[in-house]
Image: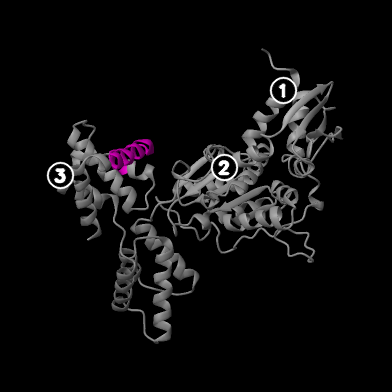
């Protein structure tokens, strides 16, 4: 039996709506609706109550309007039948019509920028200019290039020169804390603002974006203003996007903002502590969009880059130090850029407060204390050595393409331990263990977890190696 036309039209609308709003909202506000009839371009739907109707009009009318116009044309109209429960049972009230405006403020179209409130402005204070929220010290001039960030930096310069009109949209920067993601993201924004003063550039941390969304949605009930403000940005930088995890409403809002900006050739720059494939708690439709452009990893700097960072930092602070001192600090502090700079600041403060000259002996004493506080992270190479020693294998065996069971399992254990004991991404781990891709590493980790649950002997292998690495 072929469904009647009004059912077909409404089901087509629901397919679009269901892909846009979170499942909980869909089940609450759209699953109970019943299509009643279709007369020319007027669709009548039945809703449970007047409150239900008012909520739909307030929160979803733009979305429903867009879907109906898609199905019925520009003259589409919507009417409600409201069910009211009385002592005699359900009684249907007369139809209540709703005129669908020709150009409603749907997520991709907003009012003119001059009428949009800026969520960064304190109420009562007029501010026409939008502050980019950028730190001028985070620029390309003091962002030291090395093997650890060369791809990301080169892509960033290209983006700054052609924001929104390049193949790197979005640019997704990821890596452990303290490796320069925020610095590089803001440097791109600063450079773009210098080259294109007329463009609106905005940097915002994911936590602040989330609090603004909640404020607009719950407290002020001005979600459309919030959406329209962000949709008029030319270069939008969202820092720590992984913090959107499990926040369905915020993800939905950002999904619409992302789509609008991307389709309008506006630039998006995102940072995260993990690659898109490793993020949890984010909707798949959002993760897929994160992969549209370029994902660039920032890794811990090598010795020469660490020394260059120290030289640049001391030069900017107007302090002269010997090459020997730079090399000593760079050889001791190996974790991340933030700790390298922190070590230099601590050294300068100690020398100034105690009125002592900065000598190699003082440097070694200070860095030894810092290293004892911040234990050096176990590297993927360290883990490979431990695994080879434990299973009495040659390092070349672990990196070979052999499919011998004992070597495959040792390789999988090395990948599993590298994921748990280091801050390297799956792609970085795979590259260091036999040139594998991130999918192979993820499969290896899942296999090890399964075997640990079912094979007691295999589990003991992993426990023994974990003890060695922790010890």
- Viewer-nearest residue: 395 or 247: 247
Between the residue at mark 1 and the residue at mark 3, the CA separation in whole angstroms equals 65 Å
Q: Residues within 10 Å of mark 2 (few under 14, many from 20)?
A: many
Q: Residue at the spot x=56%, y=40% of the render?
A: 286
Q: Residues within 10 Å of mark 1 (few under 14, many from 20)?
A: some
Q: Helix, strand, or loop for circle 1?
A: helix
Residue marked by disc 1? 7
Q: First in sequence, mark 1 or 3: give its number.
A: 1
The answer to the question of whether label 1 and label 3 lie on touching residues, with beta carbons closer than 8 A, is no
- Viewer-nearest residue: 22 or 113: 22
Q: Which quarter of the rendered picture does the N terminus lie within? A: top right
In the figure, is residue 226 to the left or right of 366? Answer: right
Instruction: In the rendered view, tell whether residue 401 sits above or below residue 218.
Output: above
Residue 33: name its quadrant: top right
Q: Residues within 10 Å of mark 3 (few under 14, many from 20)?
A: few
Closer to the eye: label 3 or 2: 3
Q: Residue at the spot x=53%, y=56% of the render?
A: 140
In the figure, is residue 379 to the left or right of 46? Answer: left
Residue marked by disc 3? 391
Residue marked by disc 2? 170
Q: Magenta segment, which residues?
A: 431-450
Q: Is residue 444 magenta?
A: yes
Q: First in sequence, mark 3 or 2: give its number.
A: 2
Q: Helix, strand, or loop for circle 3?
A: helix
- Viewer-nearest residue: 69 or 144: 69
Q: Helix, strand, or loop for circle 2?
A: loop
Q: First in sequence, mark 2 or 1: give its number.
A: 1
Q: Which quarter of the rendered picture does the C terminus lie within? A: bottom left
Residue 106 location in percent, x, y?
Answer: 75, 39
In the figure, is residue 20 to the left or right of 138? Answer: right
Residue 390 location in percent, x, y?
Answer: 15, 48
Q: Is residue 208 magenta?
A: no
């Amino acid at each position: 039996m072929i469904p009647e036309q009004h059912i077909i039209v409404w089901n087509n609308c629901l397919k679009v709506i269901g892909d846009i709003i979170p499942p909980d909202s869909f089940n609450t506000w759209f699953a109970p609706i019943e299509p009643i009839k279709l007369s020319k371009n007027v669709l009548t739907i039945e809703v449970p109550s007047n409150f239900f109707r008012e909520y739909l009009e307030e929160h979803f009318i733009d979305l429903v309007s867009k879907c109906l116009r898609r199905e019925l044309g520009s003259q589409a109209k919507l009417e409600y039948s409201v069910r009211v429960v009385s002592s005699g049972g359900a009684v249907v009230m007369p139809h209540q019509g709703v005129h669908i405006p020709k150009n409603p403020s749907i997520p991709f179209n907003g009012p003119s920028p001059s009428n949009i409130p800026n969520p960064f402005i304190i109420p009562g204070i007029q501010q026409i200019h939008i502050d980019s929220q950028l730190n001028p010290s985070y620029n390309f001039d003091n962002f030291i290039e090395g093997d650890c960030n060369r791809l990301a930096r080169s892509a960033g310069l290209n983006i700054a020169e052609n924001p929104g009109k390049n193949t790197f949209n979005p640019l997704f920067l990821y890596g452990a804390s303290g490796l320069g993601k925020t610095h590089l993201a803001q440097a791109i924004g600063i450079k773009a603002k210098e080259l294109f003063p007329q463009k609106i550039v905005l940097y915002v941390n994911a936590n602040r974006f989330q609090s603004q969304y909640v404020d607009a949605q719950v407290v002020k009930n001005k979600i459309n203003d919030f959406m329209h403000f962000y949709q008029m940005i030319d270069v939008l930088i969202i820092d720590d996007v992984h913090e959107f995890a499990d926040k369905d409403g915020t993800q939905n809002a950002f999904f619409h903002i992302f789509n609008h900006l991307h389709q309008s050739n506006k630039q998006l720059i995102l940072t995260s502590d993990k690659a898109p494939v490793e993020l949890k708690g984010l909707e798949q439709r959002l993760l897929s969009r994160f992969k549209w452009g370029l994902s660039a990893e920032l890794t811990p700097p090598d010795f020469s880059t660490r020394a260059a960072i120290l030289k640049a930092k001391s030069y900017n602070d107007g302090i002269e130090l010997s090459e020997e001192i730079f090399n000593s600090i760079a050889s001791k502090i190996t974790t991340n850029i933030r700790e390298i700079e922190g070590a230099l600041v601590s050294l300068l403060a100690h020398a100034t407060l105690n009125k002592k000259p900065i000598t190699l002996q003082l440097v070694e004493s200070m860095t030894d204390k810092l290293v004892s506080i911040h234990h050096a992270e176990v590297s993927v190479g360290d883990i490979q050595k431990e695994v080879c020693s434990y299973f009495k294998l040659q390092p070349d065996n672990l990196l070979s393409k052999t499919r011998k069971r004992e070597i495959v399992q040792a390789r999988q254990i090395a990948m599993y331990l590298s994921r748990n004991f280091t801050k390297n991404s799956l792609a970085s781990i795979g590259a260091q263990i036999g040139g594998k891709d991130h999918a192979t590493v993820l499969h290896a980790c899942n296999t090890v977890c399964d075997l640990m649950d079912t094979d007691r002997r295999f589990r003991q292998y992993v426990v023994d190696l974990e003890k060695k690495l922790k010890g």
